[in-house]
Image: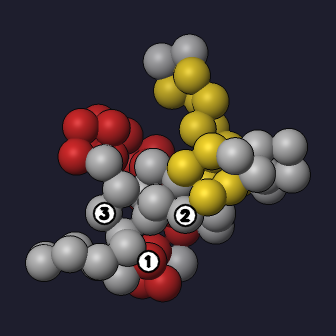
Amino acid sequence: MQIDPVCGMQVDERNAQYKTEYKGKTYYFCAPGCKKAFESEPEKYLKGGPVGMGGEGRKPWWKFW
């Protein structure tokens, strides 16, 4: 299992529909919105960690779609 770097959900990399490569590493996503968010600002998510599963000032996971 992998962790979606945008929302923090677990993703089974064997069955993942949404994935992208960045700097030689493959990242897996639970939904197209998370993939799109990551591709637009990958360093934001790599430095700050998943932001979609709550926390002050953070976007709820369902708003990424």
At a point 48% along the width and 84% down the height, the residue shown is: 62
- The residue most toward the left is 56
At label 3, which amino acid type do we have? Val
User: Disc 1, disc 2: CB below 8 Å?
Assistant: yes
Residue 59 in picture, x, y percent from top left? 29, 78
Q: CA distance from mark 1 to mark 2?
A: 9 Å
Mark 2 Cα within 10 Å, few/some/many (few <14, many 20+)? some
Say which residue label 3 marks.
51
Residue 29 in picture, x, y percent from top left? 61, 55
Q: Callout 3: helix, strand or loop? A: loop
Say which residue label 2 marks.
9
Q: Callout 2: helix, strand or loop? A: loop
Say which residue label 1 marks.
61
Residue 51 in picture, x, y percent from top left? 30, 63
Q: CA distance from mark 3 to mark 1?
A: 8 Å
Left or right of 25 in this view: 1: right
Checking the image for residue 5, the label placed there is none
